[in-house]
Amino acid sequence: MKQGIHPENYRLVAFKDMSNEDVFITKSTANTKETIEVEGTEYPLIKLEISRTSHPYYTGQTKLVDSAGRIDKFKSKYKKFKK
């Protein structure tokens, strides 16, 4: 491992998933101006739109987004090739 290339300012930071309000604490060097109190201790806060607790891959909940009926259009277009 090369010396002197890794940051020295690791600290505990709270990450908050805004889609389900889940908060988890881990070490990070990310800068933020917001804070949050978790179990009586104040931590810097990083807001996330998606995390391991809300991502469809980890939760097993797949969401199908069909804008303007594209899937139906595709199926009807290629229906004649169905065996």
Image: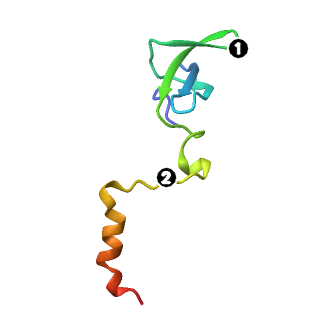
Can the viewer see residue 8 in this picture? no
Can the viewer see residue 51 in this picture? yes
Q: Position of residue 39 (x, y in %)?
A: 70, 14
Disc 1 is placed on an element classified as: loop
Other-residue count near label 1 (Cα within 10 Å), few / some / many at <14 / 14–19 / ≥20: few
Disc on the earlier residue, 1 or 2: 1
Disc 1 to disc 2, how far (Cα)?
Answer: 34 Å
Q: Amino acid at mark 1?
A: Glu
Residue at the image point whose x is 33% and y is 54% from the top: 67
Pick the front one: 61 or 11: 61
Q: In this picture, is 18 found above or below 32?
A: below
Outermost residue to the bottom: 83
Outermost residue to the right: 39
Residue 78 shown left or right of residue 44 in the figure: left
Q: In this picture, is 1 found above or below 18?
A: below
Residue at the image point whose x is 57% and y is 51% from the top: 61
Numbered circle sitting on residue 39: 1
Considering the image in quadrants, where does the C terminus appear?
bottom left
Q: In this picture, is 67 found above or below 77?
A: above
Numbered circle sitting on residue 63: 2
Residue at the image point whose x is 49% and y is 35% from the top: 2
